Image: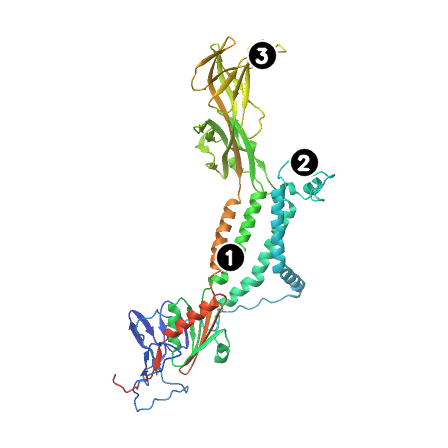
Amino acid sequence: MSSSLLLNLDKTLFQALSPPLFSISNARIFLPCRRSGVGVVGFKPRASRDGFEAEALPESKTKKKSRSNGGSSKKIIFFGSAPPPLSEERGGGAGNGSGKPAPEGSSWVFLRRAFKRALAVLSNLPLAIGEMFFIAALMALGTVIDQGEAPDYYFQKYPEENPVLGFITWRWVLALGFDHMFTSPVFLGMLILLAASLMACTYTTQIPIVKVARRWSFMQSAETIRKMNFADSLPRASIQDLGIILMGSGYEVFLKGPSLYAFKGMAGRFAPIGVHLAMLLIMTGGTLSAAGSFKGSVTVPQGLNFVIGDVMNPNGFLSFPSESFNTEVHVNRFYMDYYDSGEVSQFYTDLSLFSLDGKELLRKTIRVNDPLRYGGITIYQTDWSFSALQITKNGEGPFNLAMAPLQLNGDKKLFGTILPTGDPDSPNVKGISMLARDLQSIVLYDQEGKFAGVRRPSSKLPIEIDGTRIVIEDAIGSTGLDLKTDPGVPVVYAGFGALMLTTCMSYFSHSQIWALQDGTTVTVGGKTNRAKLEFQDELNRLLDKVPELVAVDQNSNG
């Protein structure tokens, strides 16, 4: 009559139960045993599977009792140190379970066949590679063709009389939407086609591979195991010992009677699916950025304000304004820092955001590379200008003289204004000219165009020119702001993060091991999807650790 034997070795629990199916995990090991006819078997560590010669301990002259199944007597394996605990697999069967196929209706046969054919075409690898190359070519073309210009610009740059590359004219550019490449029907259509190919490949190839990899099965033929990429035999070993050693090396181990199945590295099988999902996220985010964003730019003098919605322009058919567009932006102050050479080093804008009822929502001083973000809207400091020069004339004023930008060769700025000194209604108006490259110094010229002097707005020093006493009170600058909403940015970041993670996961090897106990011989075989040499070396090291069984006489006192 069977019973249960409980052994506690280094706080590791071994419980004997009668069912023949076992699972080695992180809990317990359950081994069948009987009170009658139980023999203790000693073991020695297996130094080398090739050069070890067993040394049997003295046996009793009493014959071992035969078991009803014709095998050897029941054995209890003792380990020198406590192995990780093992647990019984409650599920039963050689797999994760199987569902019943849904019944097929005759009305769905044609649609199913068409769907399968479409999946077969879309999941074709050369097609997907061609789609990616075509998208890359469109992106390169989008960097060559200036984007977002007026039609007249393309009429002049791509005339029909002299086509670029012999065939590119303004008709091609405007008809195909290449003036807005990343929202053009051609580009978005290729993104949709590539996304369909990725999903088809995931559905038809990657998901089935994962399902097969997750299905644990046992082999009942030692000959089948010997035909694997790596196979070996342990002449005097226990399959339970092998299972514990494999589990200690990170394998998930399952035992059923004389059969063992173990695997590890399942994450490597999920990696291709993760890569496909990451690419879909990146394409989705890019589409949202191209077709669902708003952009705008504005130059605002110090002390004035504007409403965000008045300067924002939609980029595509997915652009929808939000409540933040009703926010009013007030420019409290604009100022600049300078190098010792006098060149502008940085410019700043003190901004306040107000709701329509006049409540201040946020205040921040922005600068280049330090924008303001509010409600999904980002306000960048991108440029500056000279708005007006505030002066007093002969003690009267102050007056604001508008500064106009002047044409210069190169990227340096120059602004100018004039203070009339004669009759403003005269056809030959003369005046005092004032020029400035920045907000820190003003150069003045008399009516004849001769240099008169330089004044800083902060000095408040008067200067007399042609009988007119002038004091420069202040230089009023204008801030150049770019506003942008981009709902695709967090999606793109998430996609690239997932792509890096799943790419690293793809380097994990999915290794599988099968073993079969035949008397005292254990036949072991395994395979892996990558790093095959490392897998063979690892399995050799693990098999060398399996203890070799040495028979002991049941009546021995030692």
Q: Are marks 3 and 1 in contact (CB under 8 Å)?
A: no
> Which corner quadrant holds the N terminus?
bottom left
Checking the image for residue 430, the label placed there is 3
- Numbered label tally: 3
Instruction: Give the structural element (helix, strand or loop) at label 2.
Output: helix
On the rendered structure, is 59 left or right of 482? Answer: left
Q: Residues within 10 Å of mark 2 (few under 14, many from 20)?
A: few
- SS state under label 1: helix
Q: Categorize mark 3 by other alpha carbons within 10 Å: few (<14), some (14-19), many (20+).
A: some
Closest to the observer: 174 or 472? 472
- Kind of residue at badge 2: Pro
| Mark 3 → mark 1, Cα distance in angstroms | 74 Å
Query: Is label 1 or label 2 in front?
Result: 2
Residue 132 at least partly seen: yes
The x, y position of residue 252, in whole percent, is 42, 68
Residue at the extreme left? 557
Residue underneath mark 1 = 274
519 to the left or right of 308:
left
Using the rendered view, name the quadrant where residue 433 is placed.
top right
